[in-house]
Amino acid sequence: MYETQSDNQHPYGVTVLYGGSGTGKTTLLARAVAEHCQYAPTVVLDVTHDLRELLVGSQHSPRTLHPNVTVHYYTSLEGYEWSLKQWFMTFSAGDIVFIGPPEKGGDPSESIRLFTAILTSTKHSKRFSVYVCDEAELLFSNNQFSRQYDNAIYTARNRHASIYLAAKRPTRIPTNVRSCAMRAVVFKLRADADARATEELGPSELFRDRVQNLTIGKGLYYCGQGPGEELPILDSRESPIPWLETAPEVYSKRR
């Protein structure tokens, strides 16, 4: 279940972000990842290339990652394992690995297989401290893999790793996975079923009404507030990332 607000002021655990296309969800996720990867090795499943374009830049947008961050790209498990053996690859703070199809709009199956191997296998999982999945619905649409994620998420939490799951529709994320989250940012949800799925975060009718009427770019931030407590609103482009405010101190103690 969601933990209390006082237990939540650190960068660890599962963070979920919900919101339809164009609501600000991926913008906030990109900002969080850009900050987090400076402190811990990070792996990103980005099958749409949207995060890559926001963080690394494109012909239409500048790079937003810190200049000292090193970027790596992989498209398949075989290619990833080959590079580990060939180049004795290790990852540390300031390394970010993007996993996705070679071309935007390409088949995501090999990318999902690689991310699944990294997240769920002892062999690979300890190489990273931060796991990021945009379009997280894709992880749980394949029964072959979805049963592996529960144990992986619990294991990651126990070793103080961080997992980001961003989804357009919370109803596509299993309830037991949603309940593992330490915090949630909910942007505008248009479907009533998706709004109802967020009732676990607060007073049901009030919360449901608010998430269906949010302004674009604004998200309700839940981190264990009790009944009747006001939920702060985060601006996807401007608000500080609350759970990363202690990151410099926390990660300096781990080195």
Image (cartoon, rainbow, N blue to C red):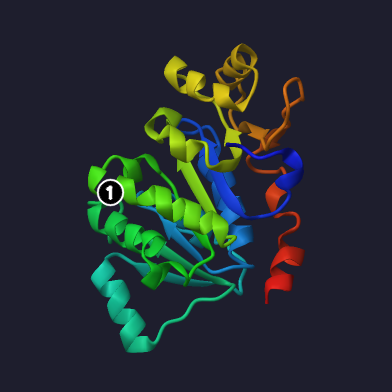
Say whether residue 89 is visible. yes
Residue at which label 1 appears: 105
Coordinates of residue 82 in the picture (x, y in percent): 28, 80
Which of these two is toward me, 99 or 238? 99
Q: How many marks?
A: 1
Q: For residue 233, which quarter of the picture?
A: top right
Residue 26 image point, x, y percent: 51, 43
Q: Position of residue 78 (x, y in %)?
A: 24, 72
| Position of 1 relative to 152 (above/below) | above
The quadrant of the picture occupied by the N terminus is top right
Whether residue 61 appears in this view of the structure is: no
Element type at mark 1: loop
Q: Nearer the viewer, residue 85 or 106?
A: 85
The structure residue drawn at horizontal position 76% and vertical position 25%, both measured from the top left corner, is 230
User: Is 148 or 64 nearer to us in this picture?
Assistant: 148
Q: Residue at x 56, y 21 (%)?
A: 199
Q: Is residue 92 above or below residue 223?
A: below
The residue carrying pointer 1 sits among few (fewer than 14), some (14 to 19) or many (20 or more) residues within 10 Å by Cα, namely few
251 left or right of 1?
Answer: right
Residue at 75%, 20% (x, y): give it: 228
Disc 1 marks which amino acid? Gly
- Report which quarter residue 101 is drawn in: bottom left
Image coords of residue 149 (percent x, y): 38, 50
From the image, which quarter does the C terminus lie in? bottom right
